[in-house]
């Protein structure tokens, strides 16, 4: 936040530093204001399966068939959940594509809308979604995080 009429700059911590712009890491990030979830939004987030679908579609758009395969579920059952998430704005449908056999497939992407809600009541479904996802992992895929101070044999590097 540069002051007008000179080269003085106030940093995020309020300290004046002549001729210096705040570093990018010091600039405050703008987050949309949080709002309470509607009944439909809270209901949509009350399912651990729907939370898992949102997590899967966060980094890459996935079709209903891809989601069903990854979950090991029936595509018709998954489509019901995908439509619920789309109707409430948690998923968005991307441009339709041609599938492997020429069928029309629609990829879905998570909108991150759930991050703007408060009091959505999805804490328990979130924990269940995490546990369901972790249950499918082999022991060698799980990495333990040691708790305690860094030291010899702890695998942590002191800073």
Image (cartoon, grey):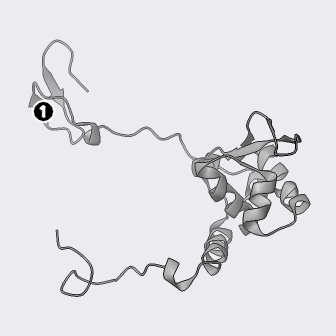
Of residue 49 and residue 20, the one placed in the foreground of this image is 49
- Residue shown at 78% from the left, 70% from the top: 72
Up-down: is 23 above or below 55?
above
Outermost front residue:
101
Q: Is residue 89 visible?
A: no
- Which residue is at a point 68% across and 70% down the rendered structure image? 125
Is residue 96 visible in the rendered structure shown here?
yes
Is 150 left or right of 115, judged from the image as shown?
Answer: left
Residue under the image location 13 percent in, 28 percent down: 20
Q: Of 124 and 51, which appears nearest the observer?
A: 51
Question: Which element is circle 1 on?
Answer: strand
Q: Position of residue 39 (x, y in %)?
A: 78, 54
Q: In the rendered image of this protein, does residue 42 appear above or below residue 159?
A: above
Residue tagged 1 = 16
The quarter of the picture where the N terminus appears is top left
Q: Position of residue 62 (x, y in %)?
A: 71, 49
User: Which of the 4 image quadrants contains residue 96?
Assistant: top right
Left or right of residue 17: residue 106: right
> Where in the figure is residue 119, as x and y percent of width and height?
63, 59
Q: Nearer the viewer, residue 142 or 99?
A: 99
Quarter of image, res 143:
bottom left
Question: Quick one: which residue is furthest to the top in this view?
Answer: 5
């Amino acid at each position: 936040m540069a002051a007008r009429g000179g080269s003085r700059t106030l940093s995020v911590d309020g300290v004046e530093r002549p001729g210096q712009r705040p570093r990018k890491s010091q600039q405050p990030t703008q987050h949309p204001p949080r709002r309470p979830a509607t009944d439909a939004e809270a209901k949509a987030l009350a399912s651990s399966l729907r939370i898992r679908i949102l997590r899967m579609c966060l980094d890459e758009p996935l079709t209903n068939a891809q989601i069903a395969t990854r979950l090991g579920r029936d595509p018709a059952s998954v489509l019901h959940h995908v439509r619920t998430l789309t109707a409430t704005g948690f998923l968005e449908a991307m441009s339709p594509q041609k599938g492997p056999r020429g069928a029309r497939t629609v990829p879905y992407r998570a909108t991150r809308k759930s991050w703007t809600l408060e009091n959505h009541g999805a804490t328990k479904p979130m924990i269940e979604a995490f546990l369901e996802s972790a249950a499918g992992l082999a022991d060698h895929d799980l990495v333990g995080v040691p708790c305690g101070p860094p030291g010899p044999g702890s695998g942590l590097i002191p800073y």
